Amino acid sequence: MRKVLAAAFVPVSVAVLVAVLAACTWVWVDRGSADEDGDRTAAAAATGREAAGLFFSLDPTDVDAGIDQLLAISTGTFATDYAAQRDTLTEQVESKGLTVTATVPAGGVALEHVTDTVAQVLVAVDTSTALRDGSTELDNYRVRVRLALVDDRWRVSGVEQVG
């Protein structure tokens, strides 16, 4: 009986060792992909937050700088359309003397959808608009920022007001 147990011990031990190594490898590989997913979703949320802030922030002393910042993180038809509106937007902001400061409150970003190539981020934006007469208007906006992964970086491919 001892010979049978001894003869079976080595193959069983090898089989158990292989199973443990396979399980460890699977957990390690799966954790690595979870880390990548977490990094990708965090980057999408951060880009959505940045885009919403830039979209709503306007400074009459340097409108072009704000437009350029948003265009730098944009792509596709959104970038083309936004760039085409530069002159109109600049004229309106400068002529009205509006200074709009946008902030995204804590908890104001929610990842709505993400894949390997696209994402949608819902962002709450609070704005404070300083008018020429010295008064201030406060507003709240909710926007969906659409993103596309371009050269391993999230780029804005659309912004739409949702509430």
Image (cartoon, rainbow, N blue to C red):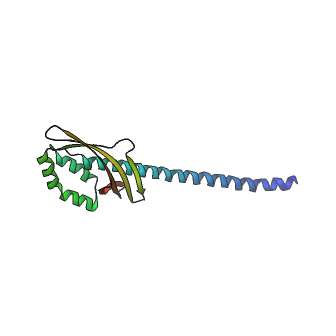
| Residue appearing at x 54%, y 53% in the figure | 30
Task: Give how far across and how far down residue 78 sits, in percent.
Answer: 26, 59
Q: Among all residues in the image, which is located at the extreme right?
A: 1
| Residue appearing at x 24%, y 45% in the figure | 57
Toward the viewer: 1 or 106? 106
Toward the viewer: 84 or 25? 84
Q: How many marks?
A: 0
Q: Among all residues in the image, which is located at the extreme bottom?
A: 77
Q: Is residue 43 left or right of residue 90?
A: right
Task: Give how far across and how far down residue 37 sits, in percent.
Answer: 46, 53
Q: Quadrant of the N terminus?
A: bottom right
Q: Is residue 65 left or right of residue 22?
A: left
| Residue appearing at x 38%, y 47% in the figure | 109
Task: Give how far across and how far down residue 58 sits, in percent.
Answer: 21, 46
Q: Is residue 138 left or right of residue 133?
A: right
Say if residue 43 shows up in the picture: no
Task: Give how far across and how far down residue 118 sits, in percent.
Answer: 38, 59
Q: Is residue 109 left or right of residue 5?
A: left
Decide: is 158 above or below 137. Answer: below
Say if residue 58 shows up in the picture: yes
| Residue appearing at x 33%, y 44% in the figure | 104
Toward the viewer: 109 or 39? 109
Q: Among all residues in the image, which is located at the extreme left?
A: 95
